[in-house]
Amino acid sequence: MTSRLTRLGYIDVRRTSNPVRRKVRSRGVPPALANNELFYTEDTATAARSITQALAPLRLDVATDLRDDFAATMHGVRLRNVSMLYLDLHVAATIDIPVLGQYFAVHMPMNGRAVVNHRGQTFEANTIRALVTTPGVPLRIDFDDDSPQLIIRIEARAIAAHLTRLLSRALSKPLEFEPEFDLATEAAMRWHTAVQLIHTEVFHPGSLIQRGQGIGAVEELVMSTLLQLQPSNYYDEFLQPPQPDQRRTVVREAMNYIDDHLAERITMESVAKVVHMSIRSIQQGFREELGMTPMTYLRERRLERAHEDLTDAIPADGVTVTAVAERWGFHHLGSFAVEYRKRWGEAPSDTLRR
């Protein structure tokens, strides 16, 4: 379908229509992804190249006596910073990734099992035990026969920014999760619910996400749920009750005010009036907690919202770069384009066309 959900960004979704394939039984593809096949191939080299686009440069190994039965498929959709992918290699195979890309992923086997090695831990992933990956380190997965995986991919920049806002301070070190995720606990039901919400929103025509609305809220729910459930190097701080700290409280209140009024004219005077603190105190708090000024934070958040609008837009929307820039307070198009490219690595018009 031609919609916001087909533009994965990190993978070329163009494929051969009705590719020639042998008859294989249904592999339990989630209904929401059934019409979003990214690739099908019976060639291991082609499969490795295609999976590389969705994950990272990798090596795919299949035993010689299993190659005649090999068939790889991937289905998927992407919201903005959260993607739902379904990978099936059909036979026993090994994926070796020397360095994972800048994303976190929850790999959930839908059947069978896979032995994973990640961040110094080796364990069996199965229908009640998932794998949570961390960027920039190796990953090895030994798939058993008939062991398809549902993968929830979360872009690293997005979850780091979300955690920064939740903690009201800059992250002192990169976020890292424990690899083993127990899906059988009562608490893990919240994760299942978040995943089901993505599926429901993608599956049902006319849903908020299908109309390009509510994407941010759904993604924040997914990120918050993972941060709350899965141990990480920020887990204790994330869960502990807020400690009385006037400076951090001021920063949090100022951040909330800025986030709630991004499309309006915001000055340091208006922020100071809301949080009942001097401009100097607010600026000092932002520098110490976030490593930036309040106005830099404002600009960054507006750039994020502009990027979201341009990413979500489709040609039929009639959206223009100028309209999006002005909506988020950028009234000089040239300066906006420069700042946007510096932040996102491409021109606003490129995002809109993608």
Image (cartoon, rainbow, N blue to C red):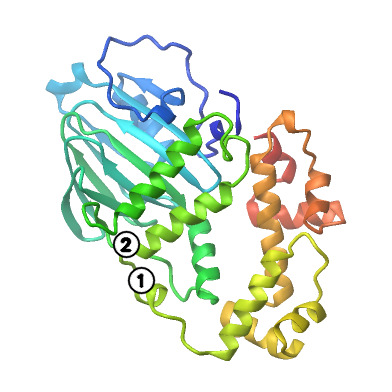
Q: Amino acid at mark 2?
A: Gln
Q: Is residue 334 above or below residue 5?
A: below
Q: Quadrant of the N terminus?
A: top right
Tag 1 and tag 2, C-beta contact below 8 Å: yes
Please say whether residue 40 is visible from this viewpoint.
Answer: yes
The amino acid on which the numbered mark 1 sits, given as a three-letter code, is: Tyr
Residue 41, quarter of picture: top left
Q: Nearer the viewer, residue 234 or 34?
A: 34
Identify the residue position indicated by label 2 in the image: 230
Residue 346 visible in the picture:
no
- In percent of width and height, residue 40 lies at 37, 21
The percent position of residue 325, horizontal first and vertical second, equals 79, 51
Looking at the rendered structure, the number of numbered marks drawn on it comes to 2
For residue 74, which quarter of the picture?
top left
Residue at image location 69% in from the left, 65% down from the top? 260
Q: Is residue 160 above or below residue 307?
A: below
